[in-house]
Image: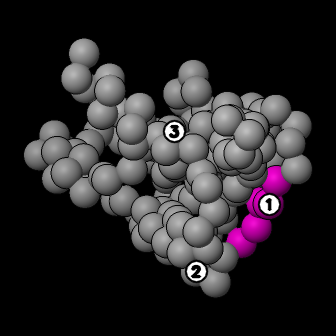
Amino acid sequence: MKYERDFKMMFVALKTKEIVDSQKLREYKKQIKHKYVTLIDDKYPNYFKTIECLPMVLFYEGNLKLIDQGLPMDYSVLESGKRFISTVDITIQNRRGEFDYVVAAECQEDLDKILEHIKGKGISLKDYDKQKKKQMER
């Protein structure tokens, strides 16, 4: 957010171990509305570790583990110039197909647009919001 997704500026900040103002960090965290993973997280997909100029942060919805499972996926550049990735894995539940999925993008705004487009198609996606609510109840 600080460097507006500029890879080179982010890389230099990480390399030089730039100090981040704690108040500014709190402000950035308040703006986050999706799950995310950074390249230093254990959950960061191995797939990205093999490409040049890897995404420093991925905002996502769905099952992040699907990226490393060798499924066919779409990894493209959006009109904004930022990248996104998506893949699905169909499972049969009660004789109905349900799509386990992951959609990830380098910025939240792009992720919102992609999710809105997908959900507008009426595709039966696995509901990860239900799982979050169940965990919160426990």
Instruction: Note whether residue 63 is visible.
Output: yes
Side of 131 relative to 28 (left or right): right
Spot the residue most to the front: 95
Counting from the top left corner in percent of width and height, residue 41 is at 53, 27
Image color mode: one colour
At horizontal 82% and vertical 32% (from top left) the residue drawn is: 69
**What amino acid is labelled 1 in the image?**
Asp
Front tag of 1 and 2: 1
* Marks 3 and 1, how far apart at CA: 20 Å
Side of 67 relative to 10 (left or right): right
Name the mark on residue 132. Answer: none
At horizontal 34% and vertical 59% (from top left) the residue drawn is: 2
Disc 2, SS: loop
On-image quarter of the N terminus: bottom left
Name the mark on residue 74. Answer: 1
Name the mark on residue 80. Answer: 2
Residue closest to the eye, 63 or 49: 63
Q: Which residue is mark 3?
A: 38
Residue closest to the eye, 50 or 44: 44
